[in-house]
Amino acid sequence: MESLFQTAESGALATAPKEEILSEVTSNTLHKARETVGDPFVENPRMTCREVNVYYGEKKAINNVNIDIARNEVIAMIGPSGCGKSTFLRCLNRMNDTIEGCRVTGDIRLDGMDIHDKNVDVVPLRARVGMVFQKPNPFPKSIFDNVAYGPKIHGLVQNKSELEEIVEASLKKAGLWEEAKDRLNQPGTGLSGGQQQRLCIARAIAVSPEVILMDEPCSALDPIATAKIEELIAELCEHYSIVIVTHSMQQAARVSQRTAYFHLGDLIEVGKTDRIFTNPRHQLTEDYITGRFG
Amino acid sequence: MDQPATNPTIDKMNRGLKRRYRAERRFRICGATAVFTALCFLFLLFFSIVSSGYKAFQKTSIQINVFFDPAEFTNENLATANFPGLIKASMSAMFPEVTSRSDKKDLYYLISPGASFQLINLVKDNPALIGQTQQIWVSANDDVDMLLKGNIDRTRPESERRINDKQLAWLDTLAGERKIKKTFNTTFFTRGDSREPELAGIWGATCGSFYTLLITLTLSFPIGIAAAVYLEEFAPKNRWTDIIEVNINNLAAVPSIVYGLLGLAVFINFFGMPRSTPLVGGLILTLMTLPVIIIASRASLKSVPPSIREAALGIGASKMQMVAHHVLPLALPGMLTGTIIGMARALGESAPLLMVGMVAFIVDIPQGFTDPATVLPVQIYLWSDSPERAFMEKTSAAIMVLLVFLLLMNAVAIFLRKRFEIKW
């Protein structure tokens, strides 16, 4: 890992003389040290992450990440492949617990509650911090059962009519109601890819989470389905905080208010999305968004 | 016509192309030949079994006129009456010219010793028969049966036949009077084993197999599934679980006779369980089947896509809920198939059961798990060892019955897989 850092750094340094000329022209001093620049912290955050490190066995995958997630914001995580953005995302609802040999240290709080506390049960935590995965993964059950599963196992409903209400509301929020209302009893796997992904979003919001984590939700979808999901994200952030990992910088620019740039396990820069894309403060961020690597 | 400039790469490719297609054709011919050869052997097997066994489904009966002499039924207990005497009397009545002692013995030989049991049952069911004369079809001796089925050659010298010339003449007389017939052999399907081939049946062995497999299924299915689910979903991946996994894989390859010896030492000698019983047989077959079920179940659990597990965990299902609601239903068809294949293997197993006394000669139909019993494959082994010609066709017939059971189990496996398969 160390040697990787060094090569990456020396790679960045190799291009340094040219950059210096460039930065003189734009009269900006770009940061080069591997520490977070920008504004990772916000007022009244929904989630706070302090000194988060993740290890896979001996290997360190995330190195000392400090960041806040605000209420009702969409924050995008970008960065080259293998930079740890998905790993970090999975820390937020402790999905990393399920991976053999994965160890998370540091302090992650949801509304001030330490999610690694002994008294915190992972089951309600995952209900409060929902997750949507890269590949649409509906259960091989009916559309209704897919959405109803969460409320059922968490005991959120007393009777069938309440359950039907929740399913309808969730599907409406996910923008799938019009397409699915006549086929609620058909298998969720029979839907198209984009519809399946919206079904997964409906499934996540059926348990009324506070935060929704999205791990490259559109990477398996065509542009039209992607546009629908992006619209949906814009609507959903009225009710939820959304953390989205994406490989598409355009998508990050379109949907998010804030953007975080990860590089080989380090959180390099956090800031308002338009600021990051127009005026990056770190050398690595600029290299990435201008397409020099990644 | 202008030839386009040739591309050397394409030329090289084209030269290799023919060889590639030839290789493919060769491979396909090899494959087809292998399948054809296998089918030929299978056909040969079925042909030899069916051709030598189909006759066992028929048996020969002889009609006799029995006078239920009231003088014989003086005792309170009807079964103590001299039924063999009644049969002998009716035979003598049919052939009054037979007088010498040895000829009479030859004549009585034509009727199966089991015929008197038939009469006992008739009288027990209907005591009013006493004093009447009845026309009754009774089983013929197995040698008569063999003669009528063409397995004894009439043209051979008398000394080399089990049926002598006089007996042949009597049988021809009976045949002329239409007092010999071949009927469907219900005895074969309703009776236990016997020293007399015409009285031997597979029902006893079938019941034994049923009880044994019932024990095996009720123990090995839940234990196997539970072990597989624990090892695959819950157990930490460390050196211990690696050792367990290696051992399970090795156990699946241990010769079955070793399980028999283990069962003998542990269940019978140590725990003192009764010998020759479906209980002990079932326990041994459980040990033998468990690795098969565990391996098949783990493989089918592994094939459940991780995305389903993540989806369930992602909305806050506990690990148990994830397994019970999502993983198990998807893995169930594979588990059932593995179980039924294991059960089919257990049904066909004889070696370990020999070690715990299930090879004993048992006439009674077992009524429970602790009654002495034998099983179908052991019955086949016992009959194949018997010297009487008639047991040979019984052996083949029993093999046919066993194969039918195996085919049925495999059909059930396919049906269950189709029934529980979840379409994506």
Image (cartoon, rainbow, N blue to C red):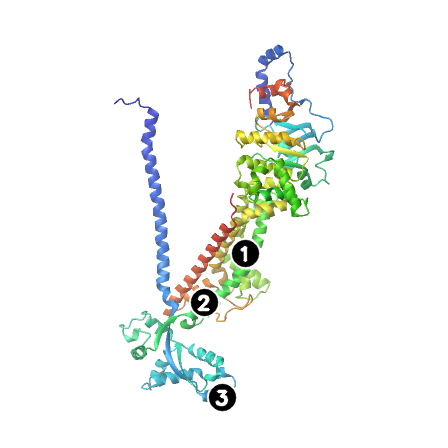
Q: CA distance from mark 2 to mark 1?
A: 26 Å
Residue B385 % position (x, y):
41, 66
**From the viewer's perspective, is residue B291 above or below residue B380?**
above
Query: Hey, what amino acid is under mark 3?
Result: Thr
Choose between B123 and B368: the one closer to the eye.
B123
Query: Could you tell me which secondary element the residue under label 2 belongs to?
Result: loop
Residue at point 54%, 30% (across, down): A224
Residue A59 visible to an observer of this rendering? no
Choose between B55 and A16: the one closer to the eye.
B55
> Can you tell which of label 3 and label 1 is closer to the viewer?
3
Residue B268 % position (x, y):
56, 63
**From the viewer's perspective, is residue A43 above or below residue B183?**
above
Callout 1: few (<14), some (14-19), or many (20+) C-alpha neighbours within 10 Å?
A: many
Callout 2: few (<14), some (14-19), or many (20+) C-alpha neighbours within 10 Å?
A: many
Which label is found at residue B74?
A: 3
**Residue matched to label 1:** B287
Residue A146 visible to an observer of this rendering? yes
Chain at tag 3:
B
Instruction: Give the mark nearer the N terminus: 2 vs 3.
Output: 3
Instruction: Give the mark nearer the N terminus: 3 vs 1.
Output: 3
**Residue matched to label 2:** B202
Query: Hey, what amino acid is under mark 2?
Result: Ile
Kindly indicate the quadrant of the structure image that contains residue B42: bottom left
Residue B217 % position (x, y):
54, 57
Q: CA distance from mark 3 to mark 1?
A: 56 Å
Which label is found at residue A102?
A: none
**In the shown orientation, is residue B239 left or right of residue B184?**
right
Residue at point 56%, 58% (across, down): B218
Callout 3: few (<14), some (14-19), or many (20+) C-alpha neighbours within 10 Å?
A: few
Query: Hey, what amino acid is under mark 1?
Result: Leu
